[in-house]
Image (cartoon, grey):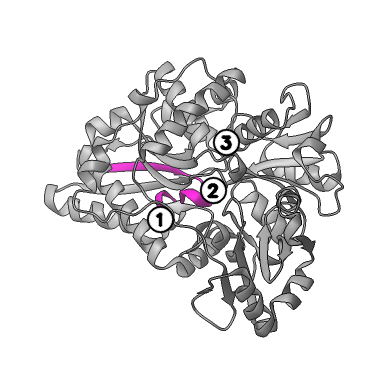
Amino acid sequence: MRTRPLAPALAPALAPTLLLLLPLATACGSASGADGSGKTVTVTVGYQSKTINTVTAGTLLRSLGYFEQELAARGKKDGVTYKVDWQDYATGAPITAQMTAGKIDIGSMGDFPLLINAVRGKELKQPTHLVSITGYNLRGGLNTVVTVPDSKLESLADLKGRKVSTSVGSAADGTLVRALQRAGIDPDKGIEKLNQQPSVGASALQAGSADALSQFVAWPGQLAYEGRAKALYDGAELNLPTFHGVTVREKFETAHPAVLDDFLRAQSKATEYLRTQPVAAAESVATETGLPAEVVYLYNGANGIATFDPALRPELLTALKEDVPVLKAAKLVDSVDVDAFVDPAPLARASAGAKEYPAAAAARPELWLKSQPQTKTFDSPAALLKAFKAAGADVRAAYVPDAVTGTSWFADKAVWVAEGSDLHAFVTPSTAKSYVAQHAGSGARIVTFAEAGALAS
């Protein structure tokens, strides 16, 4: 499949003040409800096609038609014609704005934007509820800080006094704040933070007006794949979960509970499709979004950074509560009643008897060949590199998990360490250097990708 051009902006969360300033008249369709005959109900779904951890409630779900199928079956039973109005947005903020205006019924967004969604819904008397999860990473690997490939920056400590682009209020900003604090840098005074949308930040990075970019899926992987960035900090080093989820207007949920159940059943079907046919799902999302399929697979593949499961896992909800102080410190929210925001009842109804997925398993090295319809996994990085070398020009992409955090990364973009006969891969130079320092007695040393390939032969 031909790689498509670099996609436009992925979804950041904007400050609440911006939410209120967004013009509500820009909605792509009419508010949901019945027409004059009372026999037609339009369900308006807001999604972010290029935020690929939401695809089971957006891009992939729409392409598969599962929600429409569920509604068609319901319509035959109750004599109502159901229609779906899919509204694609570049960010989560306008989805929240339209939901609080009563013009979007169901939306999907990241964990930090979800909290802002909860606050705005309550303030504007259009309360919303978190009803399911799309994709998650239990360690926080969906967020990454990157810099240009030839940058002399090698760790977060090097960011002191530098310009760093991020989207204030997003999970990527939360990762940046927490990571800087752990590195002993004041996130407010120790760096010059540029509040920019991902596409703007990516351009700023290339132009040299930003020294680093802290963003979420799929920008870091995409920029690395394109050879325009290298990872400086892996969000999984925080070991704090991050995720995306589905939110619904309370009034819609009350008026059409069965329709919400249909949506959640459809989402579960899309999740099953993605988990059982990850290559086909990645190709489909790539076609719909213009993102390179290799980048989509880095996050959404069988050993991808994201795990897809609609379940409202306790560890994710606990993490959501721990996000609140970060947003409060940034003066984006005063407080959030997470327990009141989360509503597990619809998913419990919709998923009764459905398959339960285990928690994310450790990622394995994986090779994607142009000549094969499916990928192949390996037991060790060395085995992957040996197969990589043997495949030559037939290689489409190779993925390897970080030896410490488990975050999958492109094998040819990883930092490699040789330790005796063993080979280890790392997302960032700092984690590789830390490993070498801790294993100096065993002769551990950093090697190039080519050297690692030669050692694996």
> Who comes first in sequence, dot 2 or dot 1?
2
> Is residue 137 part of the magenta span, yes or no?
no
Q: Is residue 54 visible?
A: yes
* Mark drawn on residue 171: 3
- The segment highlighted magenta reads 41-58
Which amino acid, mark 1?
A: Arg
The percent coordinates of residue 249 (x first, y second) are 35, 31
Quadrant of image for the N terminus: bottom right
Residue 418 placement, left or right of 59: right
Which amino acid, mark 3?
A: Ala
Which amino acid, mark 2?
A: Thr
Q: Which residue is mark 1?
A: 62
Distance from label 2 to label 1 (Cα)?
Answer: 14 Å
The percent coordinates of residue 443 (x first, y second) are 76, 62
Q: Nearer the viewer, residue 398 or 285?
A: 398
Mark 2 against mark 1, which lies toward the viewer? 2
Tag 3 secondary structure: helix
Residue 246 placement, left or right of 223: left
Distance from label 3 to label 1 (Cα)?
Answer: 25 Å
> Who comes first in sequence, dot 3 or dot 1?
1
State the residue at coordinates (75%, 38%): 156
State the residue at coordinates (68%, 56%): 426
Q: Is residue 36 visible?
A: no
Tag 2 secondary structure: loop
